[in-house]
Amino acid sequence: MEYQKHCQPRPGLNRVLPPGAMGLKYLELDLLDLGPGETHRETLDGKEAVLTILAGSGLVETGQFSRELGGRADVFSGRPEGAYLGEGAAWSIRAVTRLEAAIFRSPAAERLPAYPVAAAEVQPERRGQDLFVRQVSDLVGLSRPAGRLIVGETLSEPGHWSSYPPHKHDRDNLPEESFLEEVYYFRIAPADGFGFMRLYTEDGQLDQPILLKDRDLVSIPRGFHPVAVAPGYRVYYLWALAGPSRNMKLREDPSHARLGVRKA
């Protein structure tokens, strides 16, 4: 199975992770690249979505709200803005400036109203310690309404690790662990940098080293999944989780759990 894909930027809507691809049942991803004045419109049929503005700004309109969102120059220079878009929503985004955005979708579990998320509502959190300190920002976290989707961002400084100590969420065994698929979409600065990821299971049936480059996507249908970035480069990844229920219970690899308390 392929777990990695490079997402070459192209104008318009790019369906980089279509339904059922890369071993996933609950997650899809589109990347949007619009010039000033260009518009994307759609109606969500049987799905919910979370829109994340990666760079630039756009006017988002739904039956529930109309608001200009975004404004950061790139993913390394500001808090995210975006929107939750519920099943059945007819919505559009018109680029005010050059706009890059990501749209995660999942099969709808219920019908919920759309709502915007402004940068002021997102509180970056410092997690980890030592060389696995990172900044995590929940865009649509468990404190916000959604049927399945949980979406946020992680930013790590040069030479640091994240998603560490390693954790997984591939088995429904509440209250210790819940089943959630996950997707990471990476940006690296400067763009010629690189990082590494290890995707592995405790029994060794899966042990996949992954060389990460700017604009790579990685699907995580199962297993532990720590990330490292090379010295001299920063790494950002947009992440989304979804599963049969919206419970987030993570299990650490017992071989490394002694290294410290991890919060994703």
Image: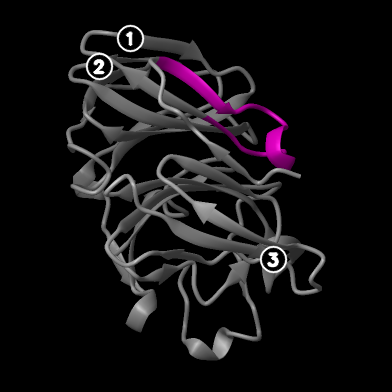
Dot 1 falls on a residue whose secondary structure is strand
- Tell me, yes or no, whether the highlighted magenta stretch contains residue 16: yes
10 Å crowding of disc 3: few (<14), some (14-19), many (20+):
many
Q: Give the CA separation, mark 2 to mark 1.
A: 6 Å
How far across and how far down the image is residue 140, in percent?
42, 46
How far across and how far down the image is residue 99, in percent?
27, 24
Q: Amino acid at mark 1?
A: Thr
Foreground residue among 45 and 182 = 182
Q: Give the CA separation, mark 3 to mark 2.
A: 40 Å
Tell me where residue 155 sits by quadrant. Answer: bottom left
Identified at 31% across, 44% down, the residue is 191
Looking at the image, can residue 154 be seen?
yes
Magenta residue span: 12-29
Q: Give the CA separation, mark 3 to mark 1.
A: 41 Å
Q: Which residue is mark 1?
A: 39
Q: Which residue is mark 3?
A: 200
How far across and how far down the image is residue 188, in percent?
34, 49
Q: Which residue is mark 2?
A: 95
